[in-house]
Image (spheres, helix red, strand yellow):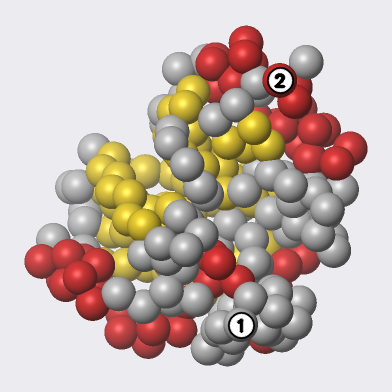
Amino acid sequence: MIKLETYILLQEFQTNTYLLWDDDSKEAILIDPSMPDTKLLDRIRQLQLKVKMVVNTHGHGDHIGGNKYFADALSCPLAIHTDDAAMLTDNKKNFSEFMGSPVPILAAQVLLGDDDEILLGKLILKVIHTPGHTKGGICLWVDKYLISGDTLFEQSIGRTDFPGGNHKAIIKSIVEKLLVLPDDVIVFPGHGPSTTIGLEKANNPFLR
């Protein structure tokens, strides 16, 4: 059975950090840990989860600040799409230097690609490459859950005015790779509240 908990560790940017696990095997992934947090680490240990990897949906500083802290504490690898890997080791590329809080550097040990699969017990998470917000942006889809990073938001889409952003690419990614999913798939974005594929298909003003 899928379990998902949402945490906002970096209040300034209201970044959603997700802990997703298979309740039978207790195998888990931690998605976009925005900063170190002892309460979340304690929660992972309390649940007796086996975190297989830390996964970044993309390489921006407000999503990766806790990478090293959690990967070290949980003795697990860090994963990101190949096209965003360089952002993890350069605080100018991930913008954390410009935000005034450079993040601890940790290179990815796992490079993800489109259609890759992450196994948690009997659960199969599919990696969906959705360039547009960044070149290596990804979403993670399992059953009725879609972790959409900064690609798709409730009634909005990821901004594309940063280096590596591309408006045509993000629209193509959403229309061709996300809106084809079942309408009842719940979307858990990088910021803000959850929504569904059906709601965004019908109401998102950027996708008309």
Q: Picture quarter containing residue 175?
A: top right
Horizontal side, residue 69 vs residue 138: left or right: left
Vertical comparison of 119 with 56: above or below:
above
Horizontal side, residue 88 vs residue 120: left or right: right
Horizontal side, residue 198 vs residue 16: left or right: right
The quarter in which the C terminus is drawn is top right
Q: What residue type is labelled 2?
A: Pro
Q: Which residue is drawn at 47% across and 41% down?
A: 192
Q: How far apart are marks 1 and 2 (CA)?
A: 33 Å
> Mark on residue 36?
none
| Secondary element type, mark 2 | helix
Residue beneath disc 1: 100
Observer-nearest of 132 and 118: 132
Vertical comparison of 76 with 8: above or below:
below
Q: Percent x, y for residue 87?
A: 71, 76
At label 1, counting other C-alpha atoms closer than 10 Å, the crowd grade (few under 14, some 14-19, many 20 or more) is few
Q: Is residue 117 visible?
A: yes
Q: Percent x, y for residue 155?
A: 60, 26
Q: Percent x, y for residue 153?
A: 58, 36
Residue beneath disc 2: 205
At label 2, counting other C-alpha atoms closer than 10 Å, the crowd grade (few under 14, some 14-19, many 20 or more) is few
The quarter in which the N terminus is drawn is top left
In front: label 1 or label 2? 1
